[in-house]
Amino acid sequence: MATAKAIFFLGVALLSCSFIGASRALETRRSLLLPILNNGPQIFDVTKFGAVADGETDNIDAFRAAWGAACKNSTTEAKVLIPEGTYRIAQTMFAGPCSSPKPITIEVIGTVIANTDPSEYVSPEWFTFEDIDGLVLTGTGVFDGQGAAMWPFNDCKRTKNDCAPLPASLKFNKVNNSMVTGITSLNSMQFHFHIHGCSNVSLSNLNITAPGNSPNTDGMHISSSYMINVSSSVIGTGDDCISIGHSTTNLTIHNITCGPGHGISVGSLGKRPEERSVNGVSVTNCTFVNTTNGARIKTWIGTVAAEVKNITYEGIIMKDVQNPVVIDQSYGSGLSIVPSTSVWKISDVHFRKIKGTTVSNIAVSLQCSTRNPCQGVEVADVDLAYVGPLNTTFLSSCLNAKAIFGGILNPPPC
Ligand SMILES: *[C@@H]1O[C@H](CO)[C@@H](O)[C@H](O)[C@H]1NC(C)=O
Ligand SMILES: *[C@@H]1O[C@H](CO)[C@@H](O)[C@H](O)[C@H]1NC(C)=O
Ligand SMILES: *[C@@H]1O[C@H](CO)[C@@H](O)[C@H](O)[C@H]1NC(C)=O
Ligand SMILES: *[C@@H]1O[C@H](CO)[C@@H](O)[C@H](O)[C@H]1NC(C)=O
Ligand SMILES: *[C@@H]1O[C@H](CO)[C@@H](O)[C@H](O)[C@H]1NC(C)=O
Ligand SMILES: *[C@@H]1O[C@H](CO)[C@@H](O)[C@H](O)[C@H]1NC(C)=O
Ligand SMILES: *[C@@H]1O[C@H](CO)[C@@H](O)[C@H](O)[C@H]1NC(C)=O
Ligand SMILES: *[C@@H]1O[C@H](CO)[C@@H](O)[C@H](O)[C@H]1NC(C)=O
Ligand SMILES: *[C@@H]1O[C@H](CO)[C@@H](O)[C@H](O)[C@H]1NC(C)=O
Ligand SMILES: *[C@@H]1O[C@H](CO)[C@@H](O)[C@H](O)[C@H]1NC(C)=O
Ligand SMILES: *[C@@H]1O[C@H](CO)[C@@H](O)[C@H](O)[C@H]1NC(C)=O
């Protein structure tokens, strides 16, 4: 992170004396001085700062210069524009705070592709947006993480407890009061979106796509953030469509289509002792298609007590989902630790109005901790049809769950 920041400032400083030809430098100066048209934001087009849309040239200096000019050097509302074309770029940070008036907009029309040389990444993110109050990231463009080149370097399967994470495509760190809409994130190396330490950010109309067998390509990982709203997006990846990490509160997820993928998961939680409670997650009107899990809460056994509470999954459609409703408090420990002795406590959880089809005969699985039995888990109107291999019993399975069942129930309650 520190290195990326240092490079950022170096990038801005280099602008006036870099390899940009003399005539282009003149052109840049002139366009910077163009009068601002009408009342819209002033446009900082990356190509005016030397970006080349040939898919080959590394555009890091140009992107940093455009961001620097818009965020740090503009006195009017500013928009960084990434126009039509394919722009290759290595690890980049767009850092605030901005001195330009809120919001600062980044509009992506073209395709931005990641550098695939692992040695170019000093920390696990490709683009970082940091310390920004009032960011709008929008457009019809694509962030292509070119993950296929990096997935072979993912060692998380082999070294489960200590893997070196590959870069997330789009990291938002301490970004507040912001909006992300429209863009496509393709084939991230690891997470597509990583939202951390943010508040009041709304993400909508996104297309997040990676193959179902790509490793740890979570559509979105959200942690230590509050008032995040994810809606109206299509997410298909090789891991959780959305995973909800520790210290997340007041998160709403609405109208998401998930699949392929591992579902929308609260957790995993408790792997590290510093992980704190998750409180207030609402997942409504979502559709899961051919996912390994649907609505899932997963905690490790853990060492420091914390809680998961006030979680609602409601109005969910399952299509050929393997494990539609899951609480798993033995996550990460293999099947040997059953029943779980997790120090995490789960309460006030609602699975309501869930219908569709499942390919697993245990469609509702609530495996809570012996030490902390779940409290106030409601399962109501969960009406699923079993479409897996025939001649098995279709059932719910509960351990230390004290679940409250109601309404139409298929499979039958525990
Ligand atoms: C910052 O703005 C000043 C005055 O508007 C201009 O002369 C200078 O080139 C700008 N610097 C950058 C890095 O955009
Ligand atoms: C964002 O909000 C957090 C918590 O409210 C605050 O600590 C941080 O300074 C804010 N960041 C910006 C860039 O405003
Ligand atoms: C949330 O952010 C939006 C800008 O995206 C802003 O208009 C709104 O006032 C913010 N809400 C709160 C509660 O700060
Ligand atoms: C998402 O983007 C991919 C790649 O650009 C495209 O093939 C797919 O059709 C898009 N999906 C939606 C729902 O827009
Ligand atoms: C979430 O965002 C969507 C789309 O921007 C909006 O319609 C909805 O009202 C928001 N929900 C909440 C709870 O903020
Ligand atoms: C749900 O999301 C899709 C995009 O996936 C969008 O086309 C549709 O309008 C959204 N529906 C509602 C009711 O917001
Ligand atoms: C969560 O939202 C509720 C209702 O909007 C609000 O009262 C509460 O302060 C919020 N809590 C956090 C931690 O954001
Ligand atoms: C429960 O979480 C929702 C957000 O999902 C929030 O609006 C509500 O205020 C929370 N309720 C309590 C009692 O914390
Ligand atoms: C949720 O989905 C149901 C059924 O698809 C629909 O009737 C309802 O209007 C949706 N609610 C919202 C808030 O989009
Ligand atoms: C379901 O997912 C599996 C594994 O990701 C895949 O092999 C299969 O083709 C998918 N089926 C459908 C109908 O999409
Ligand atoms: C169904 O399974 C039971 C026990 O596993 C077996 O005895 C029975 O023959 C099976 N029935 C059919 C039609 O395969």
Image (tube, rainbow, N blue to C red):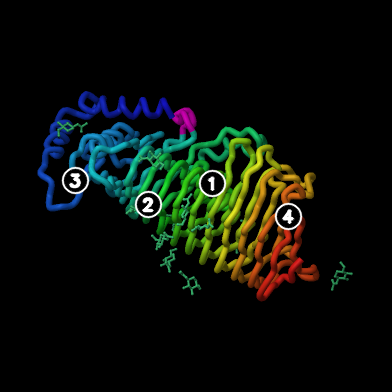
Q: Which residue is mark 2?
A: 180
Please tell me whether residue 224 belongs to the stretch shown in magenta: no
Q: Which residue is mark 4?
A: 367
Q: Earlier in the sequence, mark 2 or mark 3?
A: 3
10 Å crowding of disc 4: few (<14), some (14-19), many (20+): many
Ligand 10 closer than 8 Å to label 1 CB? no
- Tell which tag, 1 or 4, sits nearer the viewer: 4
Q: Earlier in the sequence, mark 3 or mark 4?
A: 3
The image shows residue 213 at horizontal and vertical percentages of 59, 50
Residue at x-position 33% and y-position 33%: 60
Q: Which residue is mark 1?
A: 217
Q: Earlier in the sequence, mark 2 or mark 4?
A: 2
Q: Earlier in the sequence, mark 1 or mark 2?
A: 2
Q: Is residue 1 above or below residue 76?
A: above
Q: Is residue 399 visible?
A: yes
For the residue labelled by badge 4, is the local secondary structure a helix, a strand or a loop?
Answer: strand
10 Å crowding of disc 3: few (<14), some (14-19), many (20+): many
Q: What is the spatial separation of the Cα atoms under label 3 and label 4, in whole angstroms?
A: 55 Å
Please state which amino acid type lies under the numbered disc 2.
Val
Residue at x-position 50% and y-position 47%: 222
For the residue labelled by badge 2, is the local secondary structure a helix, a strand or a loop?
Answer: strand
Q: What is the spatial separation of the Cα atoms under label 1 and label 4, in whole angstroms?
A: 26 Å
For the residue labelled by badge 3, is the local secondary structure a helix, a strand or a loop?
Answer: strand
